[in-house]
Image: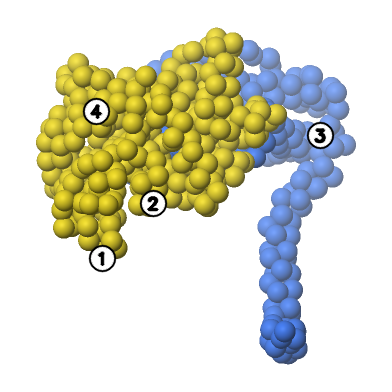
Chain colours: A yellow, B blue
Amino acid sequence: MGVGIEVGQLSAWFGRTQALFGVSLNAAANHATAIIGPSGCGKSTFIRCLNRMHETNLEARVEGQVRIGGQEIYGSGTNPVELRRRVGMVFQKANPFPTMSIYDNVAAGLKLNGVRNRRRLDEVVERSLRSAALWDEVKDSLKKKSGASLSGGQQQRLCIARALAVEPEVLLMDEPASALDPIATAKIEDLIFELKQRYTVVIVTHNMQQAARVAEFTAFFLMGRLIEFDQTQKIFTNPSDKQTEDYITGRFG
Amino acid sequence: MPNSASAYGSDYVRWRRRLTDHAATAAAALTTILVLAPLLAIFGYLIYRGAGTLSWAFLTRTPAPVGEVGGGMANAIVGSGTILAIACALGVPLGVGSGIYLAEYGRNRLGNLIRFTADVLNGVPSIVVGIAVYALIVLRQKHFSAFSGGVALGIMLIPTVTRATEEMLLMVPHSIREAALGLGVPEWRTTLSITLRTALPGVITAVMLGFGRIAGETAPLLFTAFGNQFWNLRPDQPTAALPLQIFAYAISPYDEWHRQAWAGALVLILLIVGTVAAVRLIAARGTVKGAA
């Protein structure tokens, strides 16, 4: 089951450049929350702070609180490696492991953490690929074909399956469909609809229609600041902030 | 609908493009032949001069005393194998390890220092490496040995493997590392099982290039492995090696030894080619279809 995310006064830096300024918002469990805003507004930085990927950049720094399922992830008791198993991530560009088969790509998270039980791996691989709506397309070449030999849309669903295989509570998606054609995008969106029954989804997107379609809540970011956060319907029909309205109506960005 | 002449230019333009295309293809083919020619010529000449002397006895017997016909280089073949095994056991882990450090953590002054040192070491003449190992190991142990020869060749292998491993790891896209880290895979595991694994074909090629280079080295072995006319399987004793044996026979005044030197050179090349081919074959197993 998904868990809620509470973010309080989150600020982030790359070296001396501040990318986020005191962002506070709560993402509800088992719902999808969309993050929208123009390029460079801090959307990606924001979700990369939620699984502590931001700090893998040597110059990066974070301040503030993030509680996932009630646990303070920047507290001294949290190991970032264990956190990332609970908070899965799908990246903008599909990034399957190029030397691995489809099967091994999905099983990678478990195998690399020491799971050897063949039966359990088989089970998890099938379940994850089914959840990612990819099973029927690849079931006959699981171990024969490389993950890199799939089409772009299939690769992205493979990456989603790979993230699901470690059974996370939260799924972060960083513009997961921005490199895909409309048909592949529709498949990913349908998938997000399914996934939020079981996971808390936070999705960064450039595409406002996409946010409207998949997310119950939407946050609008501008220049590293959270401008407005509300129910998606409200954001798109009756925003409280002038800047949000300007962005939604295409006056800038 | 436009006719083909106006869509793709006049006949003259088309004709000129086709000519340019053919000329460029021919030039590329010619340079390929020029590159391959010396290799084929050397190999052909070695077969021409060496194949006649090559026999089962040559591969299984030790050298015959001066003046006697026959004998072989079995001890030198085994000796070369021993020395190269020691060299690889030393050079490959150190080289790959430091390559990993340079690629993943080496964006600092220590990294630059290591890079500079490796490049200098790469340029050190092989005989100097031999003398250094002679002074450091042979003089201290008071005898020549396969071990000291292996150390000398291993030292020569390190910079090649280090720099090549670094280059190959840096070619692995950052997104692949992030994918693994994002799954909750620890950093060390990501480096070994994902980054290094992805770069492995390139790293193996680099190791094989370095291997081929040191396998034919003679100078570093002159005062380390030293050579031996008899069987010796102990790594702490003077040991025969193919390049040493070829060198000794080639500068001798005896026709029979000259013939044996040619055969030895042929065996050396065949062993290097065979090892490289075998390693590639083994490495190619277990890769999946369509893997990048």
Label 3, secondary structure: give it: helix
Q: Say if residue B224 shows up in the picture.
A: no
Q: Which residue is mark 4?
A: A5
CA distance for labels 3 and 4: 84 Å
Q: Is residue B212 left or right of residue B165?
A: right
Label 4, secondary structure: give it: strand
Q: Are marks 3 and 2 in contact (CB under 8 Å)?
A: no
- Dot 3 amino acid type: Glu
Q: Are marks 2 and 1 in contact (CB under 8 Å)?
A: no
Numbered badge on residue A251: 1
Task: Please report the residue visible at 55 percent of the width from the left and 21 percent of the height from the top.
Answer: A127
Q: Chain of mark 1?
A: A
Task: Please report the residue visible at 28 percent of the width from the left and 57 percent of the height from the top.
Answer: A248
Q: Which residue is mark 2?
A: A209
Numbered badge on residue B256: 3
CA distance for labels 3 and 1: 91 Å
Q: Quadrant of residue A30?
A: top left
Point out the frontmost of discs 2 and 4: 2
Q: Chain of mark 3?
A: B
